[in-house]
């Protein structure tokens, strides 16, 4: 899926490269030119920005690590003790076209997905406090992730029938 939008990925990674080499999180090494909304995601990749090739590869390895964290959460959520069934469900998750698009794009969608999934995990386990605290931070990862925050807040509201203003 990266082959459909490589320029966008390189533009986003250029921010990280310039932060490492020029101290400026910008598309341009000299002026502030914003070209990404995924500041948090690309700042995490800064230690690998000493070389553009390493940075590009680190971006995909980072995506694979986040995929494994998704699989770990899913494994913990499946209550069934049948290992074959658990592995089959994980296999279906990994082969899902939607998740292939998320994890192979090179963008920070996988980080938003992980935070949402982790919040969902806490919500299912009955720890709404942790779920809501995580949901507060979704827009920091990516501004449009506020919609995911709303989803978590709405589900907790439906369960508790009350609204709290402060969660942090």
Image (cartoon, rainbow, N blue to C red):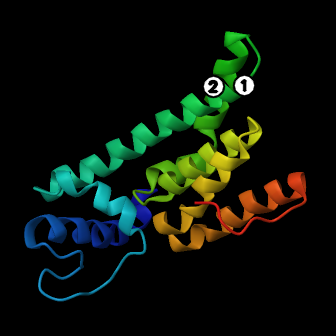
- Is 119 placed above or below 105 here? above
- Is 76 placed above or below 148 here? above
Instruction: Classify mark 2: residues with Cα within 10 Å, few (<14), some (14-19) or many (20+).
Output: some
85 sits to left or right of 7: right
Q: Residue at x 64, y 19 (%)?
A: 87
Q: Which residue is mark 1?
A: 78
- Looking at the figure, which quarter contains the C terminus? bottom right
Instruction: Classify mark 1: residues with Cα within 10 Å, few (<14), some (14-19) or many (20+).
Output: few
Q: Position of residue 75 (x, y in %)?
A: 63, 25
Q: Position of residue 14 (x, y in %)?
A: 23, 70
**Is residue 97 visible to us here?**
no
139 sits to left or right of 16: right
Q: Position of residue 62 (x, y in %)?
A: 35, 45
Q: Which mark is residue 75?
A: 2
Q: Residue at x 67, y 11 (%)?
A: 83
Give whichever of 99, 137 is nearer the camera: 137
Labelled pair 1, 2 in contact (Cβ < 8 Å): yes
**Is residue 110 visible to us here?**
yes
């Amino acid at each position: 899926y990266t082959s459909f939008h490589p320029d966008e990925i390189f533009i986003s990674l250029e921010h990280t490269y310039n932060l490492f080499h020029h101290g400026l999180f910008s598309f341009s090494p000299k002026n502030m030119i914003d070209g990404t909304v995924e500041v948090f995601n690309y700042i995490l990749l800064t230690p690998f920005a000493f070389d553009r090739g390493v940075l590009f590869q680190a971006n995909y390895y980072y995506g694979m690590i986040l995929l494994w964290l998704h699989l770990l959460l899913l494994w913990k959520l499946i209550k069934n003790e049948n290992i074959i069934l658990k592995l089959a469900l994980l296999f279906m998750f990994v082969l899902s076209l939607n998740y292939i698009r998320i994890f192979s794009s090179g963008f920070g969608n996988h980080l938003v997905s992980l935070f949402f999934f982790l919040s969902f995990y806490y919500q299912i386990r009955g720890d709404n406090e942790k779920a809501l605290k995580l949901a507060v931070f979704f827009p920091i990862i990516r501004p449009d992730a506020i919609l995911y925050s709303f989803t978590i807040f709405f589900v907790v509201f439906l369960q508790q029938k009350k609204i709290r203003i402060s969660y942090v």
